[in-house]
Amino acid sequence: MSNKPILNWISYPFKDNPATSVLLILFYLIISIGLWQIAVVTWEMPLFFYLGILVFTISLLPYFIPTKYEFFDDKIVITYFIIKVEKKYSDFRCYYADKKGVMLGTFSRPRRLDNFRGQSIRFSKTQEEKERLFKLLDEKIGKRF
């Protein structure tokens, strides 16, 4: 087992998709203005505005910060800004791809709970790592759907 990753890359959707990023910022501003009108102007409860903006911002955070993916012999390390998540390959029983990445599932077949229990791996803009990742996951996890 070496300390050097077999495969690694950084995914930064905010920078990689400028048109989507502009639309997301406009949507964020519209939601903020609407929430301000409801919570502060109508209800006179600014605490609801701040709580709503906090929840909304936290839910969008993975889009705005770069995510580093590192695949080692025995584990996957995912770093979001200051949060580091380590998962063993044995935690996952299947995987399946979509156009933006791969979902590692904890069940033997794809399930709706995979979004909550599994791990989503997002490709970089160039998707150079795609084939190497599939080969690695075939070797470590096996079941591809």
Image (spheres, grey):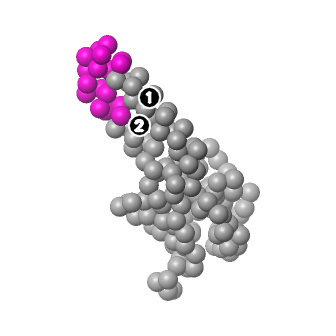
Q: Gap between marks 1 and 2, in whole Å? A: 9 Å
Report which residue position mark 2 lands on. 56
Identify the amino acid type marked 2: Phe
- Residue 72 pos. (x, y %): 53, 77
Report whether 65 appears left or right of 36: right
Numbered mark located on residue 31 in the image: 1
**Which x, y percent locates residue 49?**
31, 27
Q: How many marks?
A: 2
Q: Residue at left 44%, top 64%?
A: 79
Callout 1 touching callout 2 (CB < 8 Å): yes
Residue 19 appears in the rendering? yes
Q: Is residue 140 magenta?
A: no
Quadrant assignment, res 96: bottom right
Pick the residue in front: 92 or 124: 124
The amino acid type found where label 1 is placed reads Ile
Q: In which quadrant is the C terminus drawn?
A: bottom right
Badge 1: few (under 14), some or many (20 or more) residues near its Cα, within 10 Å? some
Q: Which residues are magenta?
A: 37-53
Instruction: Assign the magenta stretch its main secondary structure.
Output: helix
**Quick check: can you spot residue 138?**
no
Farthest bottom residue?
A: 2
Q: Residue at x 31, y 13 (%)?
A: 42
Residue 85, image x, y percentages: 43, 63
Give the quadrant of residue 125.
bottom right
The answer to which of 122 and 26 lies nearer the viewer is 26
